[in-house]
Amino acid sequence: MTLSVFIVHNSNKKTMKTRNSLLLVGAFALFAIIITSCGDGGKAAREKATMDSIRVADSLTAVQRVADSLAALPKTIAETAINTPTLSTLVAALSAGELVEVFKGTDAFTVFAPTNEAFAAIQSTVDMLLKAENKSKLQSVLKYHVVAGTYKAADLKDGQELTTLQGEKLKVAIKDGKVTVGGAEVVAADVAVSNGVVHVISSVVVPKKM
């Protein structure tokens, strides 16, 4: 009796151990499945996030290309002068003469643009012209540097005379490869702008009448 009870009791203990072992194995298996599922889901999420990032990056790149293309387009005469440090005195003179807006439009002009050094060489005259009461004289001098239409370097001929917006003419001279207009040397030709062309010159040309 005692032996049979012990056997039954021992058998029950083995059954319980076996059941517990199976439950433990099942628990580990379930845990492994859950981890695997979560891992797969996380991987899918990461892959989706990566693809979304690539699409966003591609879109930003496309936008940047358009922006760069627009930025590469020629600016107006006024915008070009404003963005050129060596022409800051010219910009100040155009502003004082209320002529900036003229060169922001679509009408084509050829501008012979004096550098800051060119204006500095006649500083006393510049100071006089920048006074409010001399605005008409300032406009006259500035317009003397402008010709209607587009005249690139290749269009300029020795002895050619260009009628300026001021009314008087500028004479072109070409000698030893150097181009002068009204006696001022062209130091940078064919600066691209959207409404004509700009030639940078080494000195300010002053008309006979102001």
Image: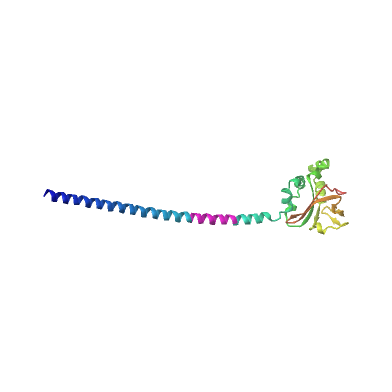
Query: From which residue to which does the magenta span run?
Result: 48-61
Q: Residue drawn at (19%, 51%), measured in percent from left and top?
A: 12
Q: Is residue 119 magenta?
A: no
Residue at the farthest bottom position = 155
- Numbered marks: total: 0
Q: Residue at x 50, y 54 (%)?
A: 50
Residue 91, above or below 33: above
Principal secondary structure, stretch drawn in magenta: helix
66 vs 122, left or right, is left
Residue closest to the far front: 3
Q: Residue at x 63, y 55 (%)?
A: 67
Q: From the top left corner, tell me how far across and down residue 24 is, in percent.
A: 29, 51
Q: Nearer the viewer, residue 52 or 74?
A: 52
Q: From the viewer's perspective, is 83 left or right of 137?
A: left
State how the image is colored: rainbow
- Residue 15: percent from left, percent from top: 22, 52
Residue at image location 38% in from the left, 52% down from the top? 35
Q: Is residue 150 above or below residue 137?
A: below
The percent coordinates of residue 30 (x first, y second) are: 33, 54
Looking at this rendering, what residue extends furthest in the left direction?
1
On the rendered structure, is 155 left or right of 28? Answer: right
Q: Is residue 90 left or right of residue 21?
A: right
Q: Position of residue 46 (x, y in %)?
A: 47, 54
* Residue 52 inside the magenta-drawn segment: yes
Q: Looking at the image, which is closer to me, 133 or 55?
A: 55
